[in-house]
């Protein structure tokens, strides 16, 4: 009797998500580094320089926004080149840049970075952007660690299932009618041992499900929430529990058959 397993599909799904979050983390690192490399002027100095630039361009018949590249422009460009592609990768429709900035950095920074706000980056705003980026990096790192934990749990369950199902397939080739009483006893004990292994795997999985992944004591990610995100489109919400429970049920059926033969031999 073949065992339906979703563990391999789950491993593929987790690997894909790990790749996505690792890429997004690197993008935020580049974004933060780019913002940190700017040399913004204090608010008063910024206002003075913008005013002087505006007067010069006015005499020349030009437009300040057309001719001057501000730090705010550079931040928007950095965000577009680094973070934005990963933030909108799963969207079916085009999302305005400022909406993406609002989703990633919050309302206040989105307002400051809006072109129509007509302000430039100050050291305080620079620090706020770097601080928010660092917060997102901690969240992404916590997610990556949780995905690592999920991968380890899935791989351990896959090894157990492959070992047990391999044993069942090998021993199903021998008819119970051809086994003696002591051999049947031995078969029953082996099945019990495999069922205990399944029970241990179920308990370990429950412990993982109820765990929380923390980073720097600042970000806590409940593993159950991660599973809801990962497997919301799966036919089962808990691929390991579903697979191991089915395997245990198969072992129980085999054990009952062995007991029936043992009873007939008494």
Image: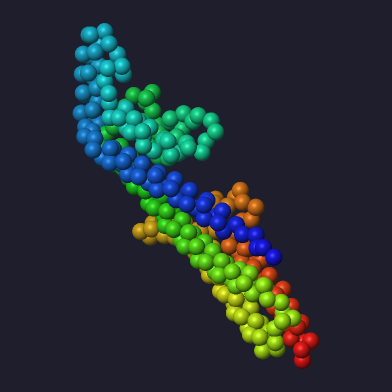
Q: Which of 213 and 45 is in front in this view?
A: 213
The residue at the point 76 percent across, 82 percent down is 260
The residue at the point 21 percent across, 23 percent down is 49
Position of residue 60 in the picture relative to residue 15 (left or right): left
Up/down of 126 relative to 70, above or below: below
Q: For the image shown, how many numbered marks are present on the structure?
A: 0
Q: Which of 209 and 259 is in front in this view?
A: 259
Quadrant for the N terminus, please. Answer: bottom right
Position of residue 77 in the picture relative to residue 96 (left or right): left
Residue 77 location (% of width, % of height) = 34, 30
Q: In which quarter of the image is residue 161?
A: bottom right
Residue 93 location (% of width, % of height) = 53, 30
Q: Which colour scheme is used?
A: rainbow
Residue 34 location (% of width, % of height) = 28, 37
The residue at the point 28 percent across, 37 percent down is 35
The residue at the point 48 percent across, 48 percent down is 16
């Amino acid at each position: 009797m073949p065992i339906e397993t979703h563990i391999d599909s789950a491993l593929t799904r987790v690997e894909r998500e790990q790749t996505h979050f690792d890429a997004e983390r690197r993008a935020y690192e580049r974004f933060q580094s780019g913002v940190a490399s700017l040399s913004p002027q204090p608010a008063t100095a910024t206002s003075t320089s913008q005013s002087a630039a505006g007067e010069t361009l006015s005499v020349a018949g030009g437009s300040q926004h057309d001719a001057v590249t501000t730090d705010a422009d550079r931040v928007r460009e950095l965000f577009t080149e680094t973070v934005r592609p990963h933030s909108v990768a799963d969207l079916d429709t085009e999302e305005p840049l400022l909406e993406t900035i609002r989703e990633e950095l919050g309302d206040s920074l989105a307002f400051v970075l809006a072109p129509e706000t007509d302000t430039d980056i100050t050291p305080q705003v620079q620090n706020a952007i770097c601080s928010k980026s660092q917060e997102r990096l901690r969240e992404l790192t916590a997610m990556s660690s949780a995905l690592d934990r999920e991968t380890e749990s899935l791989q351990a369950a896959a090894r157990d299932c492959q070992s047990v199902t391999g044993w069942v397939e090998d021993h199903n080739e021998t008819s119970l009618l051809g086994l003696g009483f002591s051999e049947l006893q031995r078969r029953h004990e082996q099945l019990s041992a495999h069922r205990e292994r399944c029970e241990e795997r179920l308990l370990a999985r429950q412990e993982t499900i109820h765990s929380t992944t923390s980073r720097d004591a600042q970000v806590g990610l409940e593993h159950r929430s991660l599973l809801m995100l990962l497997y919301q489109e799966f036919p089962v919400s808990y691929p390991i529990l579903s697979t191991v429970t089915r395997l245990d049920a198969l072992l129980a059926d085999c054990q009952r058959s062995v007991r029936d033969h043992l009873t007939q031999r008494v």
